Image: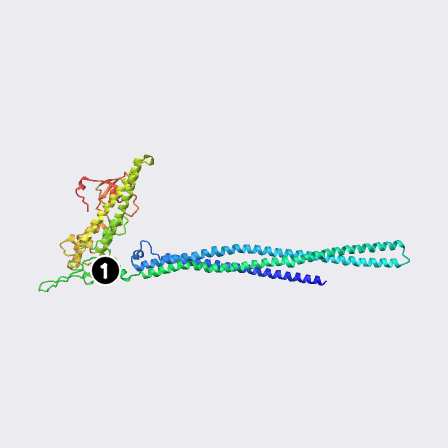
Amino acid sequence: MELGRATLLKEQQLKDQFDNLEKHTQSGIEFVERYSKFVKERSDIEISYAKQIRNLSKKYQPKKNSREEEENKYTSCRAFLSTLNELNDYAGQHEVIAENLTSQIITELSRYLTELKAERKSHFHDGRKAQQQIESLWKQLESSKRRFERDCKEADRAQQYFERMDADINVTKADVEKARQQAQMRHQIAADSKTEYSNYLTKFNQEQNEHYYTLIPNIFQKLQEMEERRIERVGVSMKTYAEVDREVLPIVGKCLDGMTKAAESIEPKTDSKQVVESYKSGFEPPGDVEFEDYGPGQTMKRTVSETSLSNSRGEAKERPGGGKSKGKLWPFIKNKNKSPKQNKEPLSNRFNEFMASKPKMTCLRSLRRGGSGPEDFSHLPPEQRRKKLQAKIDDINKDIQKEMDQKDALTKMKGVYEKNPQMGDPASVDPRLVEMAMNIEKLQSEVQKFEGWLAEVEGRLPSRSDPPRRQSGLYESQNSNSTMVDNNCAQDRESPDGSYTEEQSSETQVKVAIANTPEFDDEFDDGDEETLPTIGTCKAVYSFEGHNEGTISVTEGELLFVIEQDKGDGWTRIRRNEEEEGYVPTSYVEVFLETNTKGAMTYI
């Protein structure tokens, strides 16, 4: 009985230990899952942070064809652009961190957790199976023990019954023999039960010994090793977590060094020189003002400063006798209502409007063709215009060189085809060669045109050794109307900031200039523009798709009317019908002018 109680106690303790181990190992698995979730959230944070950094860098990148892109010539702007690029690389390192955390920790821990759960389940299954087996043997032992005890008691009772029957003289001999045989049978059954109980006891002891000294220790050892591997894996993951950050530190350091280097590359003096170079006008500085003596019967000339516009209100009043003049006061302002009650604006205000909108005058032909400014850059100061023209010439020369290289390559290809006809048809290259030759010819004509403008600008730029001279007004003389118009168009422009516009010396000079420049009305009165007469016909040699505003599409072989001849800018104005007209490249059409027109038309 003591053995049974001890066995039951051990079984209960073992069962309790299994429960405790099961809780502990489950807690370990939950810890690994929690750590994996922590790393995943850190990875999500890194991805989100990298995305925000990239968006920030992209947001402050200079826009194409904008003022910010033009400012990149300054060292401070270039340094900021370098900083943005380094910041973009810095964001990339955070993406690397997130990627490495996912691949080296999260994925590995997820796979390991699956294996860990399966291993833990297998060990506890083996433990429960061993426990159930020993419990089954114990029940068999208890059953054989109880049966042995019952058989022994029945054998004792049969023996006592036989002895009573044998001592009784009244019992027949047959009854005594029967009682004796019954007692012997019961003793034999008890002996067999004893043997069975002994066998079960031996087997149980062996199984119990193996259970407590072999099976259970092995299962506990496997659980212990499993737990140690789990703890070790968590430690490796934590170490990897730190190494992932450490691996990107050199590149992050290079990004920061790049930002520092960019900041150190800023040169204030260089930037200031760039500003001076960008806004250098090239205008000749004014000379000294001559002294005018006052005498009886003489009127001193009224001159206006060349450095500012006159906003005098005194001249805004109507002059005597001026009410009869009902002509146009300004080329841009048309009194379409013809209202006699309309108040006249001061001439000085209209002059300000004229100077403010004057750069548009030479832009009309280019605007009609989709341009954003005068093709000859005449709206810029001389020095800036010279730089723009030179840059344009350089770009066109690069295009010419590119076309010539391609032409040389096609020529060599054609020679190869001529030597080896099986490689290709030489005639298939001819259309492309003709097209390239035309492109080169067109580009060369463009270069000549821009070189002419450049020579004109360089001829007008004042030499540093020339003495300065002063002009008393917008025009030097009222007797030279053509000179006034030329000066007005070539030099008296308004800069983008309106800082170098010259002004008229009096309203009389403005009126004279306007009266002698009828081109203003023809160029700017778009609303009242009259239909131009036909001066000839033309045939489209090549097809042209007019995508830009002011151009017109033509197809090869099409016949059209010429209404304006090429003025040296490479464009001819044509008309298809009363509603369709526009500009096409002169090289794309073959022009046939009328006989009475050829002698009258000249290139400008």
Chosen colour scheme: rainbow
Residue placed most toward the observer, 215 or 471: 215
Left or right, 202 with reference to 261:
right
Left or right, 111 with reference to 305:
right
Q: Residue at x 62, y 61 (%)?
A: 17
Report which residue position mark 1 lands on.
499
Q: Which residue is at the far top?
A: 421
Q: Which residue is at the far right?
A: 170
Report whether residue 587 is seen: yes
Residue placed most toward the observer, 23 or 157: 157
Report whether residue 334 is seen: no
Left or right, 518 with reference to 557:
left
Q: Helix, strand, or loop for circle 1?
A: loop
Give coordinates of residue 372: x percent, y percent: 27, 51
Give coordinates of residue 176: x percent, y percent: 87, 55
Left or right, 44 with reference to 392:
right
Q: Quarter-wise, where is residue 278 in the image?
A: bottom left
Residue placed most toward the observer, 347 or 15: 15
Amino acid on which the number 1 mark rests in the picture: Ser
Q: Residue at x 77, y 58 (%)?
A: 150
Q: Residue at x 66, y 55 (%)?
A: 133
Query: Badge 1, how many Cα within 10 Å: few under 14, some, many 20+?
Result: few
How many numbered tags mark residues here?
Answer: 1
Give coordinates of residue 254: x percent, y percent: 38, 59
Quadrant into which the N terminus falls: bottom right
Q: Quarter-wise, where is residue 186 in the image?
A: bottom right
Residue placed most toward the observer, 157 or 184: 184
Give coordinates of residue 430: x percent, y percent: 29, 38
